């Protein structure tokens, strides 16, 4: 065999190397496509991942009337009113920075009261009043939804028996 024929006819080693190279390109390309797909899904779901908005975030995001979301914060002291119908409650939810008026028709949890953490699910009406379809209060004396507590800590309003307000 001449030197020219040896360079033209690939041997078994070069075929194996070529297959490995193609397989490597396929794996790298597949991982890149998978990574891109995950990034696109997470970007599209970014707003849905958050469990609730505090009043400041809800106002900053300018959530349109009718869009369902969860509102979390503290029931503002002195804001709780019962409507003429015993099952209608009006109160304000605050994060210490902003406050939103909430109207709820239904039975509130036994532990629902002013100064306590609350998460309400519902939507804004045309006047910017939050119409709640569900109200969730703390479950026991030590529980507050993690997101509500973190939001209050960021604003310096966290008051918990076991932790100081400075945290």
Image (cartoon, rainbow, N blue to C red):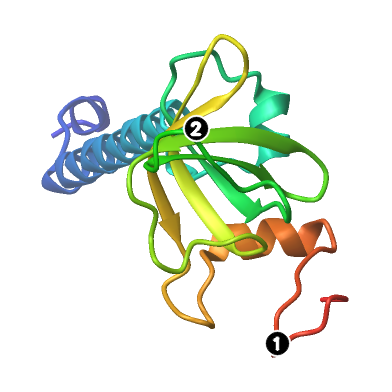
Residue 11 image point, x, y percent: 14, 41
Disc 1 marks which residue? 161
Q: Give the quarter of the image for residue 153.
A: bottom right
What residue is drawn where x is 17% and y is 34%? 10
| 146 is higher (above) or lower (below) than 71 | below
Q: Give the quarter of the image for residue 7.
A: top left
Which quarter of the image is occupied by the C terminus? bottom right
In the displayed structure, does residue 34 sit left or right of residue 85? left
Name the N-terminal-most of marks 1 and 2. 2
In the displayed structure, does residue 106 sit left or right of residue 117? left
User: 93 or 157, which lies in front?
Assistant: 93
Disc assigned to residue 47: 2
In the displayed structure, does residue 73 sit left or right of residue 28? right
| Count of marks placed on residues | 2
User: 105 or 3, which lies in front?
Assistant: 105
Residue 159 image point, x, y percent: 76, 74
């Amino acid at each position: 065999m001449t030197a020219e024929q040896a360079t033209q006819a690939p041997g078994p080693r070069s075929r194996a190397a070529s297959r490995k190279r193609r397989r490597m390109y396929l794996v790298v390309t597949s991982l890149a496509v998978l990574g891109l797909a995950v990034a696109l899904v997470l970007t599209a779901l970014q707003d849905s991942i958050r469990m609730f908005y505090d009043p400041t975030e809800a106002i900053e995001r300018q959530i349109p009337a009718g869009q369902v979301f969860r509102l979390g914060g503290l029931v503002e002291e002195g804001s709780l009113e019962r409507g003429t119908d015993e099952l209608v409650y009006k109160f304000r939810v605050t994060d210490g920075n902003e406050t939103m008026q909430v109207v709820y028709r239904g039975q509130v949890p036994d532990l629902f009261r002013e100064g306590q953490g609350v998460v309400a699910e519902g939507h804004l009406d045309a006047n910017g009043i939050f119409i709640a379809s569900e109200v969730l209060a703390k479950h026991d004396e030590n529980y507050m939804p993690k997101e509500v507590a973190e939001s209050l800590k960021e604003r310096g309003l966290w008051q918990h028996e076991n932790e100081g307000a400075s945290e």
